[in-house]
Amino acid sequence: MKIVILTDSSERHFYFCNRIINECDSVVGVFLGTKQKPEGLFSTIRKYLRRKIFLRSVFNKFINLIFLRYGNQFELEKLESEELYFGGSKDKFNSSKSDLFCETVTPAVGSINNKAYIEKIKKLKPDVIIVMGSCLIGKEIINISKHVINMHTGLSPYYRGGYSNLWPFLRKDYGFFGVTIHAMSSGIDSGAIIYSARPDVFLGDSYGSINSKAIILGTDLMIATMGHISENDLTTKSQWLSGNLFHNYHFNYYIAYKYLNNKNTFIREYCRLERDNKLPALQLVSNGIIYDN
C-alpha cells in the first residue's frame, strides 16, 4: 500500500508526517506547503469581485488594527502551544525523512491542484492520499486514488472549516472540541466520516493546547485508518447534518479579544460539566460506526 501525504509546512504538519512515516511504513512521497493558494492577477481579481469577501476583508483589516495586541497575543499563545507539543518535528523530518520529500507548493505555480503537481502525484501511483492542513482539494486529485483521507481539526459535522476548535469558545458549546478523519469530498470537511473523537481538556488549557492535543489524537486515528484500509475493513458514515461552517475570513482580532477574555471561565465551566457528567451527548464515529459520547 503506497501512501502520499499532502500537508503544510509548520511544526504540527511535520509531526504528522513523521508519525505517519514511522508507523505506516509505506509512505512514498510528501508534498509540503499545500495550504498555499495561487496569487496570480486573475485569482486576485476574481476574489475581490466577490463582494462579500472583499467587504469582509476590508472590515477585518480595520478591526485587526484596533485589536492588534489581542491578535498578537492569540498568535503567540498558539505558537507556544505548538512549540511545546511539536517543537523539533521539522528538524527530525529533514534529518531522517527528507528522501520522501517531493515538492513544496509555491503560489507562483499555483495550488496543489495545479496540473504540474497533479502529474507528480500520479507518477507515484498512490493507493492512499492523506491530507492534513491543505487548501480545498480538487476532484482531479480526489480521483487519483481509491482512498483520499483528510484530517480535520474540529468535530464534523458540528463544526467545519477554519478555526473549528476555537468557535466553541465563542459560542459556549461545551464538549464540541475535537478532530475528524473523513473521506475527502468536494465540500469543506463534509466527506463521509471514518473517525471522530474529543481530546481530554483540563484546567489551564487553551485553544492552542486543545488544538494541539486534537492533532495528536487525529494522527493516532489516521494511523488506525491506514490499518483498516490495509485489512480491507474500512467503513464510513455519511454526515448526518450540515452543522456550522466557518471560513477563515470569519476570524479577526476582535474574535481573538473575545476568546482571550473568556477562555479561562469557559475552561473552568467545561471541566465542571465534565466532572459532573453534564457535557452534551454527541454522536461520534469509530470506523464508520456512530456511538454516543
Image (cartoon, rainbow, N blue to C red):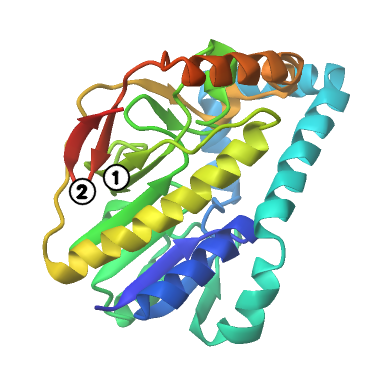
Residue 256 lies, with reference to residue 187, above or below; the image says above
Residue 64 lies, with reference to residue 129, above or below; the image says above
- Quadrant where the image shows the N terminus: bottom left
Q: Let me know if residue 127 appears in the view.
A: yes
Q: Residue 137, image x and y in percent?
A: 37, 51
Cβ–Cβ under 8 Å for marks 1 and 2: yes
Q: Residue 251, image x and y in percent?
A: 62, 25
Disc 1 or 2, which lies upstream in sequence? 1
Classed neighbour count for the residue bearing mark 2: other residues with Cα under 10 Å, few (<14), some (14–19), many (≥20): many
Q: In this view, does 162 lie to the left or right of 41?
A: left
- Quadrant where the image shows the C terminus: top left
Q: In this view, does 10 lie to the left or right of 164?
A: right
Q: Which residue is drawn at 75% across and 24% down?
A: 61
Q: Distance between the residues labelled 1 and 2?
A: 6 Å
Amino acid at dot 2:
Asn
Q: Residue 188, image x and y in percent?
A: 36, 37
Q: Residue 45, image x and y in percent?
A: 57, 37
Amino acid at dot 1:
Tyr
Judging depth in this view, the residue of 79 and 284 nearest the camera is 284
Q: Which residue is drawn at 50% across and 43% down?
A: 214
Q: Let me know if residue 174 appears in the view.
A: no
Judging depth in this view, the residue of 141 and 283 nearest the camera is 283
Q: Name the residue under label 1.
A: 195
SS under mark 1: strand
Q: Tell me the tag on residue 287.
A: 2
